[in-house]
Image: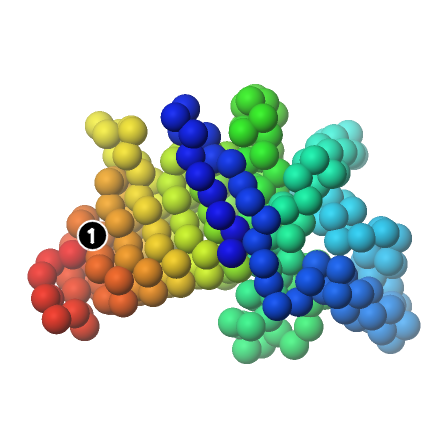
């Protein structure tokens, strides 16, 4: 689990997560997959060789972030360099990415290995780019953090504010159109599908949604304002949530209503 605590100034500090497969073991698995892919398909060889060029998962992630969000060679080099700096300063970021990657393989029945989501899933790339921008934000380098957010939004169509707090084993599935605004908190093991918006209200900018552990936010859902979604709750596709959703409940509709709670009040 990736643990955050907030200081009085609202910035989050990060502690290292734990996961059943260590980051080192995961990296060895990825390398074996890359070797097989490079030997078996010449078209995949270049991407796989790029993975094999790196000494560890942190280096591979930094290169991936630079390639996916940079719009020019100079930008790609800059973002790769910044990501490497972040991963050296805070190795827990790489451990969190390892948990995210394993979560994709556990939850997506179409995926049988680690290499395909590492190379191809833009939700994963956007989440790891956010981890770097969040580190920059906590290091009071807000301008560069916001630059990374803007680049990821332009290139990946996923916008995550650097001040958000996101746990580990998080899966941004499909990814296009996801907006996670300032100060939003998302717990471990959450799954967020395409076109989901989680953000503050303009008239109440100090309070943002809190999304619990294991929550599913289905495609097109909107969670706006000072709202809590309890652990392992589900929000249906296209739902507009206007009040809290208790743990384990499902919210559907516009405005959202609870469908499987003992107290089936309007959500």
Give the residue drawn at x 12%, y 71%.
262
Q: Which residue is mark 1?
A: 244
Q: Is residue 47 above or below residue 261?
A: above
The quarter of the picture where residue 105 lies is bottom right
Residue 90 visible? The answer is yes
Give the residue drawn at x 82%, y 56%.
51
Q: Position of residue 141 (x, y in %)?
A: 59, 22
233 relative to 159 in the view: left or right:
left
Residue 195 visible? The answer is no
Q: Position of residue 200 (x, y in %)?
A: 30, 36
Q: Residues within 10 Å of mark 1 (few under 14, many from 20)?
A: some
Q: Position of residue 98 (x, y in %)?
A: 64, 58
Q: Nearer the viewer, residue 139 or 264?
A: 139
Give the residue drawn at x 29%, y 29%.
206
Give the residue drawn at x 32%, y 47%.
210
Q: How many marks?
A: 1
């Amino acid at each position: 689990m990736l643990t955050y605590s907030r200081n009085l100034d609202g910035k989050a500090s990060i502690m290292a997560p734990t996961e059943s497969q260590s980051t080192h073991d995961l990296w060895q698995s990825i390398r074996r997959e890359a070797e097989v892919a490079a030997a078996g398909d010449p078209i995949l060889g270049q991407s796989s060789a790029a993975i094999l060029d790196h000494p560890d998962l942190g280096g591979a992630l930094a290169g991936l972030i630079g390639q996916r969000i940079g719009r020019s060679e100079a930008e790609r080099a800059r973002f790769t360099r910044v990501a490497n700096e972040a991963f050296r300063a805070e190795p827990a970021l790489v451990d969190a990415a390892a948990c995210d990657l394993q979560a994709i393989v556990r939850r997506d029945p179409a995926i049988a290995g680690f290499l395909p989501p590492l190379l191809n899933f833009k939700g994963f790339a956007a989440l790891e780019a956010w981890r770097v921008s969040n580190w920059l934000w906590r290091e009071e380098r807000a301008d560069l953090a916001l630059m990374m957010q803007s680049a990821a939004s332009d290139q990946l169509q996923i916008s995550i504010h650097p001040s958000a707090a996101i746990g580990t084993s998080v899966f941004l599935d499909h990814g296009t159109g996801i907006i996670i605004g300032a100060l939003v908190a998302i717990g471990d093991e959450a799954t967020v599908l395409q076109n989901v918006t989680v953000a503050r209200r303009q008239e109440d900018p100090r309070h943002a949604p809190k999304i619990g552990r294991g929550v599913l936010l289905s495609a097109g859902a909107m969670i706006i304002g000072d709202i809590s979604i309890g652990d392992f709750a589900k929000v249906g596709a296209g739902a507009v949530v206007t009040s809290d959703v208790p743990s384990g409940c499902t919210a559907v509709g516009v405005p959202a209503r609870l469908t499987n709670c003992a107290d089936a009040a309007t959500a």
